[in-house]
């Protein structure tokens, strides 16, 4: 039965399966609309307290920013878990970047990672079952070059199992690396050849003393290089240095 419906969102309660099914009739295009619709959804979720939920995201095109992700975690995900949600699935949005922004909203939450499927039938098969894991979660996704279309765009073909979480995580990692490279490329170029050598060795676990010995330079010179590296790259913590491996 339909328990909630607006211009944007429709919520159906499948009582035999103790399941809420939500579909975006029209994608929200502002944070105000998105948050408003989600609060209405949470209100209904608390009222019926189903143990399972399925989001049909085919029409979802809204990009969730960092502030909205934090808001979603606090005001949607956590309250639904407290209301009884134990199992969650998504049908992937046509706009993959929008869907990746949704994926980020579950970082640091206590809910098990939601599963992501290419269509409703596969999602329903999993969410209606008694299992909490897919049979092939360890299958690595495969990306192949599939030519160039008539507009000159590169076409890639993605192959994975029916549950697409691994593929989404792989895409997210690729995008994050590319964003980091674009943002920090000029910083990296500002390093001298010797500074790059010191950086490479340091992020591979060598101490400054070991680097000094291997490069046949004094520890004083090594420390000078290290200070220069941190200044040029604007490094606040050593953890951020690992990301510079993408340049090697």
Image (cartoon, grey):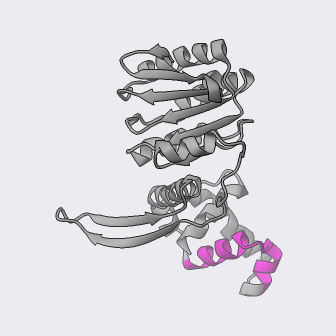
163 on left or right of 224: left
Depth check, front residue: 28 or 200: 28
Q: In the rendered view of the protein, which quadrant contains the C terminus?
A: bottom right
Magenta residue check for 92: no
Q: Reply above or below: 152 against 119.
A: below
Q: Reply above or below: 230 against 102.
A: below
Depth check, front residue: 87 or 170: 87
Q: Residue furthest left?
A: 150
Q: Reply above or below: 4 against 130.
A: above
Residue 45 quadrant: top right
Q: Reply above or below: 197 against 123.
A: below
Residue 148 quadrant: bottom left
19 on left or right of 58: right
Residue at position x 59%, y 65% from top?
A: 244
Q: Residue furthest front?
A: 16
What kind of secondary structure does the magenta stretch mostly adopt?
A: helix
* Residue 65 in sight: no
Magenta residues, as a range? 193-213
* Label total for image: 0
User: Residue 176 location in percent, x, y?
Assistant: 52, 55
Residue at position x 53%, y 53% from top?
A: 168
User: Residue 78 location in percent, x, y?
Assistant: 69, 26
User: Residue 37 location in percent, x, y?
Assistant: 47, 18
Depth check, front residue: 198 or 15: 15
Residue at position x 68%, y 62% from top?
A: 227
Depth check, front residue: 88 or 129: 129
User: Residue 142 location in percent, x, y?
Assistant: 50, 69
* Residue 187 in sight: yes
């Amino acid at each position: 039965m339909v328990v909630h419906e607006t211009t944007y969102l429709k919520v159906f309660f499948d009582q035999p399966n103790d399941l809420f099914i939500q579909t975006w009739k029209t994608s929200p295009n502002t944070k105000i609309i998105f948050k408003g619709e989600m609060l209405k959804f949470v209100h209904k979720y608390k009222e019926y307290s189903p143990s399972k939920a399925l989001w049909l995201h085919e029409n979802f095109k809204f990009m969730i920013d960092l502030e909205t992700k934090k808001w979603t975690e606090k005001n949607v995900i956590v309250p639904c878990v407290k209301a009884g949600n134990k199992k969650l699935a998504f049908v992937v949005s046509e706009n993959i970047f929008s869907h990746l922004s949704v994926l980020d909203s579950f970082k640091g939450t206590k809910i098990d990672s939601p599963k992501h499927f290419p269509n409703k039938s596969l999602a329903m098969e999993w969410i209606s079952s008694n299992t909490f894991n897919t049979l092939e979660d360890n299958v690595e996704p495969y990306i192949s070059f599939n030519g160039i279309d008539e507009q000159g765009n590169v076409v890639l073909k993605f192959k994975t199992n029916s549950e697409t979480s691994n593929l989404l995580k792989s895409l997210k990692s690729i995008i994050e690396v590319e964003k980091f490279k674009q943002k920090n490329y000029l910083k990296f170029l500002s390093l001298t050849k010797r500074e790059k050598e010191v950086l490479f060795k340091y992020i591979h676990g060598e101490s400054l003393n070991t680097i000094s010995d291997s490069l046949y330079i004094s520890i004083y010179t090594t420390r000078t290089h290290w200070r220069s590296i941190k200044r040029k790259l604007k490094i606040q913590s050593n953890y951020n240095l690992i990301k510079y491996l993408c340049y090697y």
